[in-house]
Image: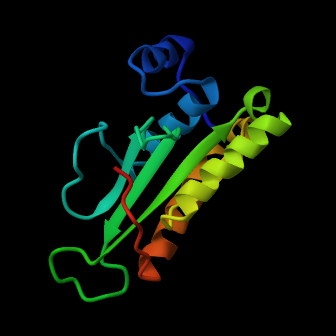
Amino acid sequence: MAKHIGQEAAGLFYSVGVTESPIETILFEEFMRSKLFTLIKDGDEPQGEGMFLYPQKEMPPYRPDFYIEAIGYGLSPKVWPPKFKTALIIECDGKEFHSSEEQIQKDAARDKFFAEKNIKTMRYGGAEIYQASGQIVHGIYNELLRRLNAGAKYEPVV
């Protein structure tokens, strides 16, 4: 099991609004520890190619736990600017808030909203995050690479 930050540091992430739950904090620190993603504040624009992480991005009518935008060349020749963009929504689903029939229906509607814009939602439960946060982050990275290499495009949500 990965070593996680202490409660004091986790409280700092909560107080500045980066994360809203312990499982989000664990996944956030794993994203940062991996050095595969660049943290972007809501309202800022990424520069160049890479994988850009937006925690709690406002995407009306929703605010996903994490929005990740990947910009790159895929398998095409490297001619500026990068040719492909893809994105994922990452949701940390604690059992307490995501197990009722009503919440399951709300989650499905939310997933459909993003799917219509070619943005895949990946959902992870608390137990998964506690036990395998590093594997989850690397799986997310590989999914973004797969989508870039396939020439994925999406409709940006403002």
Q: Quadrant of residue 133?
A: top right
**In this rendering, position of residue 77 left or right of residue 124:** left
- Image quarter of residue 92: top right
Residue shown at the point (24%, 52%) measured from the top left:
46
Percent position of residue 102, x then y: 79, 36
Q: Quadrant of the N terminus?
A: top right
Residue 64 in the image: state x and y as whole percent. Answer: 52, 41
Of 105 and 67, which appears nearest the observer?
105
Snapshot colouring: rainbow
Q: Is residue 10 above or below residue 99?
A: above
**Residue 83 versus residue 36: which sits nearer the camera?**
83
Residue most toward the bottom? 77
Q: Residue furthest left?
A: 80
Depth order, front residue of 104/143: 104
Determine if residue 135 is in view: no
The residue that appears at 59% across and 47% down in the rendered structure is 134
Q: Is residue 66 above or below residue 13?
A: below
Horizontal side of residue 60 vs 130, given as left or right:
left
| Residue 99: % across, % down | 82, 35
Q: Is residue 59 visible?
A: yes
Tell me what residue is drawn at x 31 percent, y 88 percent: 76
Report the side of 28 relative to 72 (left or right): right
Q: Number of labelled discs? A: 0
* Residue at 60%, 43% in the rendered image: 91
